[in-house]
Image (spheres, coloured by chain):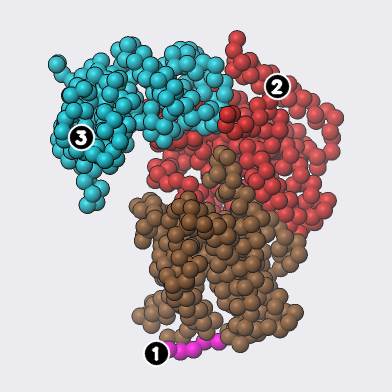
Chain colours: A brown, B cyan, C red
Amino acid sequence: MTAATIIQSLASGLLMGLLYGLLAVGLALIFGLMDVTNFAHGEFLMLAMYLTFFLFMFWAVDPLLSIPIVAAGMFVFGAVIYLVIIRFAMRAKANIGMVQIFATFGLAILMRGLAQFFFTPDYRSIPASILGGKTISVFGVFLPVPQLVGALISIAAFGALYFFMKKTDFGRALEATREDAGAVALVGIDKNKVFALGWGLGSALIGLAGGVMAIFFYIYPDVGASFALIAYVTVALGGFGSVFGAFAGGIIVGLVEATTAMILPPSLKSVGIYAVYLLVVFVRPRGLFGSI
Amino acid sequence: MSTPLLETRGVWQRFGGLIANSDVSISVGAGEIVGLIGPNGAGKSTLFNLIAGVLPPTQGSIWFDGKDVTHMPAAERCALGIARTFQVVKSFETMTVIDNVIVGALIRNDKMRDARRKAHEVLEFCGLASRADKLARDLIPSEKRRLEVARALATEPKLLMLDECLTGLTPLEAQSGVALVRKVRETGVTVLMVEHVMEIVMPLVDRAIVLNLGKKLVEGKPTDVVRHPEVISAYLGDRHAVGA
Amino acid sequence: MDSFTQRRRRDLILAAALAVIAACVPFFVKDVYVQNIMVLTLMYAALSQAWNILGGYCGQISLGHALYFGLGAYTTALLFTKFGVLPWFGMLGGGIISALIALALGYPTFRLRGHYFVIATIVIAEIGFLLFHNWDYAGAALGIDIPVRGDSWAKFQFTRSKLPFYYFALVFCCVAWFITWWLEDSKWGFWWRAVKDNPDAAESLGVVVFNSKMGAAAVSAFLTAIGGAFYAQFVSYIDPESVMTFQFSLLMALPAVLGGIGTLWGPVLGAVILIPMTELTRSFIGGSGRGVDLILYGAVIVVISLARPDGLLGLFSRRPASKGVPQ
């Protein structure tokens, strides 16, 4: 293995990592906001990828252009899911933890089933797009263009998120609600509204990731499962609930995955990520950079 | 006084930069009812948790019944004879009242039948017998407090630690709570109770220990303690001190 | 006799009656397809009963029980095909190996709470799946074909009739139920429920929370592996996809969740409703891979967890699910 191939792998790992960060940040946001893990996170990604795919198939919208549409669609979807399902799961008198785990789990299975039923289990892909299949060379390192664009979108999204959380009223309300939901109710902020918007925002972020991933990944009903695990690992690394920890966590996961793929057979590349998850939570149950 | 049942020797507890307890040495003799009092943030709850074994102190040692229990986990302390209640009640919500108490009784009874009998006795003693088959989550708050005490008593402790178990009750409920604590002491159990509100505990306890800002301020007979100038100044502005 | 003893005796009588009825069913139901569903129903009832010990009574939600199921199946199949060891010993060995692995894994994982624990169980099972997928000695992705050596109880192989498997599954289900029944009124049963409801309070009452979880994990993993060993003999061919996927972890948890988590009858009730429903929709409406079974599962789980968090058993219970605070 030459130095060049190692650099090459790590560079693609870094790009994927930035995308993983984007993929996971919605999960971290929702977790931090209301202590709920969305076990349907992967299925939200699957839906975003299908949206991108169908926009392309039926209206020939290039994935690059459909990303904002998909994000907007996912925003609405996330908010509706909160209002229709999650809100009620939070009302259980006993076993709230269990109820919300199984409610989101049921949702995941339902979405997978619906996708199989309506979209068939076939593997789909977007045959040709502005970015698809292109690579560029930067200082002799070949970078796939879709991943590169995804990484840039991720950086931009995190930047926007930072601005949003610190500078806007809603961002501050979000921040306040995650610190103390009870006190927030006293100052007249409607908790449900904040939570619904939080779910919308978290889902819109998955929409961004899904829109990019549809360009270079197969789209099928079960696609979310493996990426959901990656998202959990990312969030664990970043510290459950820490939005910007997810950014760092994503980069680490991307690099670990690339490194494992160099050492172990390709079919075992996920083992490295899973092992890192276990290592992190065993040593620090609140994640690497976790503060909550 | 012979060897005390419980003793803390120079106990410190730091949380980061915050000092919750500094050099606290207290002792509780067998058969006493001792009140641990002090204004908010005095470090009462921290000291309570250190004795109960929720976490080990940063420095210092804790002795119970002649043994060093400083680093002993809570479950083992319970086996030695320390039982506690929680300030925010922690009932086993999905279990019945009797089952809640059986959990406590199991530490001294190997056979289920014996544990069950013991639990019924304790419920009778605490005035909860009529609630035995209700789910814990269906009890009213004052009954939940009683259940906490019943569960702790079922472990047949030498020392019963009560964490603000009389706070927040109506005067009538508090009165019957006080009666229960007296009854407990009559059975030979030593009682250490943390209370914020002085009026409730002062007539009940043999001895009061006042904490303030993490340090032991004074200890002695309740009637002396409430007149102590430092105690009055620690509580100054607090209506309970004025009332006393 | 107090109400508690009465209830336990009633449970035992009801279970015996149901077992006798179940034992007679094959005299009237000769259809092999239906018998197949009945075998699976009993197997999942037993597996879910096993899952319920850790997940329901002790409150440690595992979605990685496929690992123990797979270990049971693989131990039996490997010992038989490589060393000619009879499946009964493989079954026992698989159970013991699974229990030991559960203890080893419990050591670090039981310090985790809530979602962190759930995700850890998924991830661990996934690692197990990937390792078996790449383990050449165990057939890797191709799996293991258990060679047919003629019908016999010693080799636990039956090609002509499903009935022996049916009766084994029935016994397995009864044993799992009886173990739960027995544990329910034991020290362990009380410790587990206490740990589930409030670990801090349990610890303060002398319950060693960690040990309680370990005990539940060992029993649960042992029984699950027995189920895996049975399944290997029943289908006579195993590969990682067919015994170790997440799907199995889910199918072990679901009946208990639907029927009533942490209850004696929940897993049985859940399995009796869920498994036939799945199999029937799969063959009559679904066709292959149309996902109708998943839609049904998903919808049922969502609705039940929102509308009846205590499970369907609550519908039969004399005690109202929760009356709230009487005032």
Q: In the picture, residue A50 is in which quadrant?
A: bottom right
Give the CA distance from mark 3 to mark 2. 67 Å
Give the CA distance from mark 3 to mark 1. 76 Å
Magenta part of the chain: A134-138
Q: Chain of mark 1?
A: A
Residues at discs 3 and 2 both on one chain: no
Q: Amino acid at mark 1?
A: Phe
Q: Secondary structure at mark 1?
A: loop
Q: Chain of mark 2?
A: C
Horizontal side of C188 relative to C239 (left or right) equals left
Q: Are marks 1 and 2 in contact (CB under 8 Å)?
A: no
Q: Amino acid at mark 2?
A: Leu
Q: Secondary structure at mark 3?
A: helix
Q: Are marks 3 and 1 in contact (CB under 8 Å)?
A: no
Q: Which mark is residue B232?
A: 3
Q: Is residue C12 above or below residue A276?
A: above
Residue drawn at x 17%, y 41% as measured from the top left: B22
Image coordinates of residue A64 in percent, x first then y, are: 60, 83
Horizontal side of C7 relative to A152 (left or right) equals right
Q: Residues within 10 Å of mark 3 (few under 14, many from 20)?
A: some
Image coordinates of residue A46 in percent, x first then y, are: 63, 66
| Total labels drawn | 3
Residue drawn at x 58%, y 40% as measured from the top left: A93
In front: mark 3 or mark 1? 3
Q: Which mark is residue A139?
A: 1
Examine the residues drawn in magenta and state their main secondary structure: strand
In front: mark 3 or mark 2? 3
Quick one: B151 or C220, which is closer to the camera?
A: B151
Q: Which mark is residue C14?
A: 2
